Structure formats: C-alpha cells, structure tokens
Image (cartoon, rainbow, N blue to C red):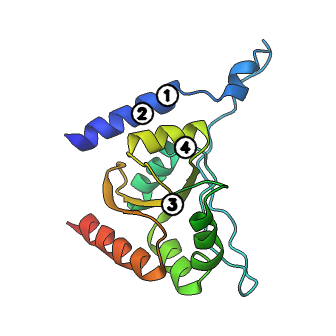
Amino acid sequence: MLRFFLLFCLSIFFACATSPKTAQRTAPASRPKPVTPPKPAPVATVPGAASIAWLDSERLMPVLEQAQREKKPVFVEFHASWCAPCKVMEEEIFTQEPTFRYLNMNFLNFRTDFDTPSGQTLASLYEVKSLPTILFLDPQGVVLERHTGMANPSVLRTKGDSALGKMKK
C-alpha cells in the first residue's frame, strides 16, 4: 500500500510540476519539449578520471520508469555545492574503480542537488534532512536502504548488496 501511495504522490507531483523558467515563458507559438528518457552520462576512459554514470535527468520519475523497464534498483545521491563531505565523496569515493564499476553495473544512478526545487521536493518526500544522503530505491521508488553522512566504498557496497538482496525477494 505504501508503494502505491509513494508512486501516486510522485506521479502527481511530476505531472503538475513546472520549473520557474518554463512558467515564465508563455510565447503562444512555443511548444512543450517532448519528454525523453534519461541518458547515462558518459564515463570517462582516462585512468583516474572515471566515475559513476549518473543519469542525465533533473526528475526522478523518468529514472523510475527506466528502472521498471530494466528491472533494476536506483542509487540516489542528495548533494549540494556547499557540502564538503559531498565533494569528498564525488572526488575520492565515486572515482574509485571498484566503487563506480559496482554502482554502474548494478544500479541506475541518479543524483539531485538539494538546493534546487526538484531536489527540495524529493528531499521532503524521502525525509532527507542532512547531506550527503544516499538511498537505494526499488523501481517503484520505495526505499530499500538509506545512509546519511559520508559513505565510504565499504558502506556503499554493504548497502547496495542489501538493496539487491531485497529486490530478489
């Protein structure tokens, strides 16, 4: 029941949400852009420069739709430009080859900026109060695992394995 409620809430929010930039443009000849599924960000091939293949989407709903099609869980990172531990994770944790390979192979990876309107909405929905926070979600958007604070590779692997185990049940 909770899954359906969360999915319903997410559907309503994303169906009704418009960005401030879109709301300001009211040219009569303008047409809304078609919604395209998120694309994985290119993974650099230079040693030491590779990282997580984050999906290129500001919204979670298209990511969840893709997760349902692919039957994969979603790794979500809440971050902000002012968050020092977030920067450490981005520069030192997510660039470690075993870590990014594990996440790229087993999950769809989505990150959201806590300071944006969509990030604030997701933070409210998932009760994210401090940064960094990571979530592992099933394809319906239900939290399988959560970790608040800086996550080292061991924590990411433990939480990820637990989420994958819950997906198989």
Report the amino acid beneath label 3. Answer: Pro
Which of the marked residues, 1 or 3, is nearer the chain's N terminus?
1
Q: Badge 3 is on which residue?
A: 132
The reply, left or right, for residue 53 in relation to residue 70 is right
Q: How far apart are marks 3 and 4 (CA)?
A: 13 Å
Residue at 55 percent across and 77 percent down: it is 100
Residue 52 in view of the camera: no
Number of the front mark, 4 or 2: 4
Q: Badge 2 is on which residue?
A: 11
The reply, left or right, for residue 169 in relation to residue 37 is left
Cβ atoms under marks 1 and 3 closer than 8 Å: no
Q: Where is residue 160 in the image (x, y as percent from the top left)?
A: 38, 72
Report the amino acid beneath label 2. Answer: Ser
Residue 71 quadrant:
bottom left
Q: Distance between the residues labelled 1 and 3?
A: 27 Å
Marker disc for residue 119: 4
Report the amino acid beneath label 4. Answer: Gly
Q: Badge 1 is on which residue?
A: 15
